[in-house]
Amino acid sequence: MLKMLNINKKRTINIITYINIIGGFKMNKLYEKVKERLSLIDNMYDIIRIIDPINKNIINISNNEITIRKEKCHDLLRHGRICSNCISMRAYIEKDIFIKIEHVSNKVILLVATPVNIDQETYVVEIIKDISTRSNIAASINYNFKNNFETIIDSLNKKIVTDGSTGAYNKIYIEEMLPVEVNKSVKNGNLLSLMMVKIDEFKNLEDEYGKAISKKIFNDFIKLVDDLVKPNPYWIGRYSDNKFLLVLNDVNQAESYKILTQIKNISEYILFNDNNKIIKLKSSFSIYCSENEISDIKSILIELEESILEEEQGRISKKTNKEKELSILNYRIQELRDILNVMNISSKDKAGYMETLKISQELDQLIVEYMKNII
């Protein structure tokens, strides 16, 4: 299970509100603690800022002054969106230091995120350094290739949070972004739906058709979902080997179930070009909507997985009952055939003829029912 933050409706994580309550004393203590830890590399950074990774709020510490900023932490990079590779969120969850390189305008910047514990509270401190000045290695880059360099940086940051096989987001991204999505939903009162999809018998698919085909199954499945969900704002991540998590923003419960039904109906059969193989794709689904008023992330994921397990067990039970019914039908069909084989009725025996006809009609009905059940 992923290590997740506990978020509830009554107490969303908001470091700015918390700072306003505790006053300047604790902030000064935090500032002194940060300065103490960074004393060995003083003057080697341009900005120190404290990050609230859930709400994306920032507190700048620069020139011995503490400033609560109105903009969000990702505004520095001018992407217009939350960073997909959020090292501050990773530092908060993993309680470890993370580093990344970004670009903005004509500058290449280095960001270091580190967790700091003060009085049993965890903060994330970001150190930012412009490494595109003349004294740095980045300055030696031939800026005729600047665009290529920026593309490389974007590609590296994307690769960190992307599943290599499917192109969907990976577990790192799910771990970082899901707390943000749930917190935003609770805080702003927006709708949020989470859909977990499990591709059944994943190992059997790989064994029978090979990894190339199983990869194509996943890619085609993600494209199918993409076509059905657009233009709704969403993202999809690979939760495990054979499980995907679909996150739908501003989609109500009725619409979510409609999308779920469409995915179920369409994904049953997928046609591949490889030797015209037709593979019946069996999937299990579960769904959570914000109307359920469950905001603890760990509980949400447990609920989704338990719902999938219940669906699988129900399907297994249904299959077992079906096999039992088919066995009974098959036995009765064979029994009637044996009776007809030993019956030797003359054309003058009207009662015997009617009995034979009755058995033949029952046999025909059982055969039709049997054929319906095995298709």
Image (tube, grey):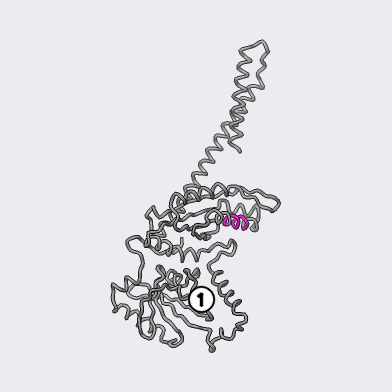
Quarter containing the C terminus: top right
Q: Main secondary structure of the magenta part?
A: helix
Residue depicted at x 63% and y 54%: 207
Relative to 356, is 133 above or below?
A: below
Examine the image and state in which quarter residue 18 appears. Answer: bottom left
Q: Nearer the viewer, residue 185 or 330?
A: 185
Q: Nearer the viewer, residue 226 or 350?
A: 226
Would residue 183 be counted in the magenta stretch? no
Would residue 219 be counted in the magenta stretch? yes
User: x%, y% of residue 112?
Assistant: 47, 78
- Bounds of the magenta segment: 215-222
Relative to 72, is 179 above or below?
A: above
Task: Give the residue furthest to the top.
Answer: 348
* Number of other residues with Cα within 10 Å of mark 1, as a class: few under 14, some 14 to 19, many 20 or more: some
Task: Give the residue furthest to the bottom.
Answer: 135
Residue depicted at x 61% and y 34%: 371
**Helix, strand or loop for disc 1:** strand
Say which amino acid is labelled 1. Answer: Lys
Q: In screen coordinates, is 288 left or right of 348?
A: left
Q: Nearer the viewer, residue 245 or 234?
A: 234
User: x%, y% of residue 42?
Assistant: 43, 87
Q: Which residue is mark 1?
A: 100
